[in-house]
Amino acid sequence: MNAKLNKVTKDIRKTEEKISEYQSKLKVLQKEKTDLENLMMIDVLRKHKVNHNDLHTMLDIFEEEKGASIPLTINDMEDK
C-alpha cells in the first residue's frame, strides 16, 4: 500500500510541475500574441499614414461611440 501512495504522490508532484510549466508557457504565448497584435495595428496606422493628431481624433471618436465600428459606407461616399 505504501508503494501505491508513493506513486500517487510522485504523480501529483509531476502533474503540479507540468501545470506550472504550462502556466508559464501560456503567459509567454499571451504576451507574444499581444505584441504581434500591437505590431499589426502599428503597421496599419503606418500604412495609412495616420499621424499623431489623427490617431488622437480617431481614438476620441471611438470613445464617443463606445467602441462602435465605423461603417464601411463612409469610404464609398468619399469615392463618390
Image (cartoon, grey):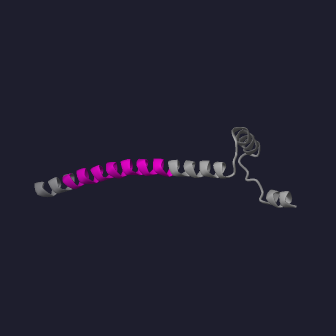
Q: Is residue 43 magenta?
A: no
Q: Give the side of residue 9 with respect to residue 26, left or right.
A: left
Q: Residue at x 76, y 53 (%)?
A: 70
The secondary structure making up most of the magenta span is helix
Residue that extends furthest to the right in the rendered view of this protein:
80
Report the residue at 42% width, 47% height from top. 27
* Residue 28 horizontal side relative to residue 77, left or right: left
| Residue range corresponding to the magenta coloring | 10-33
- Position of the N terminus by quadrant: bottom left
Which residue is nearer to you in this view: 32 or 51?
A: 51
Is 27 covered by the magenta stretch?
Answer: yes
Residue 51: x and y, percent?
Answer: 70, 42
Residue 16 on image: x %, y %: 29, 50
Residue placed furthest toward the left = 2
- In the picture shown, does residue 6 fall above or below 80? above
Q: Left or right: where does residue 48 sit relative to residue 36?
A: right
Could you tell me how many numbered marks the image carries?
Answer: 0
Q: Residue at x 41, y 51 (%)?
A: 26
Foreground: 26 or 60?
A: 60
- Point out residue 67 in the picture as x, y percentages from the top left corner: 71, 48
* Quadrant holding the C terminus: bottom right
Residue 17 percent coordinates (x, y): 28, 50
Say which of 44 and 7 sits in front. Answer: 44
Residue beneath the point at 80% across and 58% down: 75
